[in-house]
Image: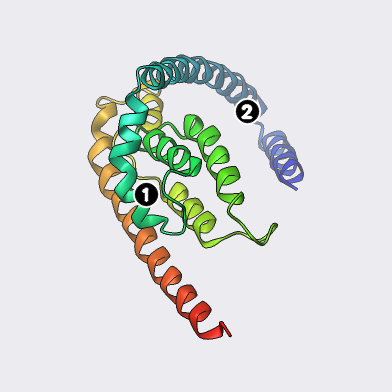
Amino acid sequence: MLNFLWGAMIVTGVIWGALHGTLGAITENVLSGARDAVNLCITMLGILSFWTGILKIGENAGLLDQLSRALRPVIRFLFPTVPKGHPAEQAISVNFIANMLGLGWAATPAGLKAMESLNTLNDKKGTATNAMCTFLILNMSSLQLIPINMIAYRSQYGSANPAAIVGPGIIATMASTLAAVVFCRIVDGKASHLQSITKP
């Protein structure tokens, strides 16, 4: 479907340019856009390599374990059905830490591992548990203290102050995460209530 939409937009643009005599401008913009895309990919590759390396150093130095332990009370509050010491706790913590650093692509492997671990606690395979839904919602709300990706994008495109996004980013993601936590707790409470009244 997306291929069809993108193809339709490209064809429409070319036809529009031909009818209005602006094919030269379209060609110039296509070439400059391709150049900018390659430059952005190189920039993001460097940032990806650097922060992935930092995360690996932190993991080998035991820093991620310490941060995971620090986040344990939060994890216990958000995921009360996950047994203490379960492997899902560390995977969820690593995912949260990567998201806080604005490293969405680094958070993905930990997120997949967390979902796999949470699924081992699932009695109804193929149906998401409350914990799985909570994790997905919190992962999407993604509290970010340092939006590295956005800073890199702004720097690449010539922003005078690329880090100016930090304050608004913290406020916006804090609000979205708070809304996600409140929503999940309300839904979890309702689900627990329904289970208690439907048990024989």
Residue in view at x 75 percent, y 48 percent: 1
Disc nearer the start of the sequence (2/1) = 2
Residue 162 numbered tag: none
Label 1 sits on residue? 75
User: Total marks drawn?
Assistant: 2
Residue in view at x 46 percent, y 16 percent: 43
User: Between 82 and 74, which is closer to the camera in this rendering?
Assistant: 82
> Dot 2: few (<14), some (14–19), or many (≥20) neighbours within 10 Å?
some
Tag 1 secondary structure: helix
Tag 2 secondary structure: helix
Residue 123: quarter of image: bottom right
Could you say where residue 92 lies in the image, as x and y percent from the top left? 45, 42
**193 horizontally vs 174: left or right:** right
> Dot 1: few (<14), some (14–19), or many (≥20) neighbours within 10 Å?
many
Q: Amino acid at mark 1?
A: Ile
- Determine the CA span between mark 2 and mark 1: 51 Å
Q: Nearer the viewer, mark 2 or mark 1?
A: 1
Label 2 sits on residue? 26
User: Between 76 and 37, which is closer to the camera in this rendering?
Assistant: 76
Residue in view at x 32 percent, y 37 percent: 69
**70 horizontally vs 64: left or right:** left
Residue 156, placed above or below residue 116: above
Residue 192, placed above or below residue 96: below
Could you say where residue 148 lies in the image, as x and y percent from the top left? 36, 28
Residue in view at x 58 percent, y 53 percent: 121
Image quarter of the C terminus: bottom right
Residue 165: quarter of image: top left
**8 horizontally vs 110: left or right:** right
Could you say where residue 110 lies in the image, as x and y percent from the top left? 51, 35
User: Between 15 and 32, which is closer to the camera in this rendering?
Assistant: 32
